Amino acid sequence: MKSVSFHVPGKPQGKARARTFYNPNLGRHMSVTPDNTVLYENLIKTMYIHAAKGCKFEKGEPVTLCIIARYMPAKSTSKKKLQQMLDGEILPLKKPDMDNIVKVIADALNSVAYQDDSQVVLVKAKKVYSALEGVDVTIEEYRKGE
């Protein structure tokens, strides 16, 4: 079964909304994706390309996207609470929203891992506390019965 796993280092980020404005020189409205989102999407692409070694999911091939967003606990957290966080007893109920994390990863992998993110038919995503901050991503062939 075809599968690619990779880690995106740094604090998990979500897809920011595009900024729309009227450009009087062109006489029309324009939308621009914020720079931070563009940079984060480029990092995701780079990490995928490095891990995939040429693996790409063909057009029309359904895929499963598995995402684990890892957050570091605050340095001021007590030892007891820190252990509860790392054991998964306390989960990160913080920004960015999980749907925005999924969106930035799915969009970044368009034309890189797959032809279009419409090929993603199943998403498994969760937020956890971890000693290593970042996002773990696995893209694999969809298996019936999942």
Image: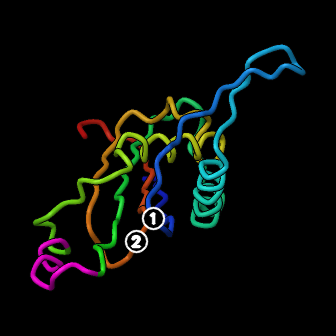
Q: Measured from the top left, where is residue 23 in percent x and y?
A: 80, 23
Residue wearing tag 1? 11
Q: Which residue is mark 2?
A: 133
Q: Residue furthest bottom?
A: 79
Residue 79 is inside the magenta segment: yes
Q: Main secondary structure of the magenta part?
A: helix
Q: Nearer the viewer, residue 19 or 117?
A: 19
Between 63 and 37, the one lying in front of the other is: 37
Q: Earlier in the sequence, mark 1 or mark 2?
A: 1
- The residue at 59%/46% (across/down) is 108
Disc 1 packing (10 Å; few <14; some 14–19; many ≥20): some
In-front residue for pair 129/62: 129
Residue under the point 44% across and 40% down: 63
Query: Magenta segment: does it hold 25?
Result: no
Q: Secondary structure at mark 1?
A: loop
Tag 1 near tag 2, CB within 8 Å: yes
Q: Is residue 60 left or right of residue 130?
A: right
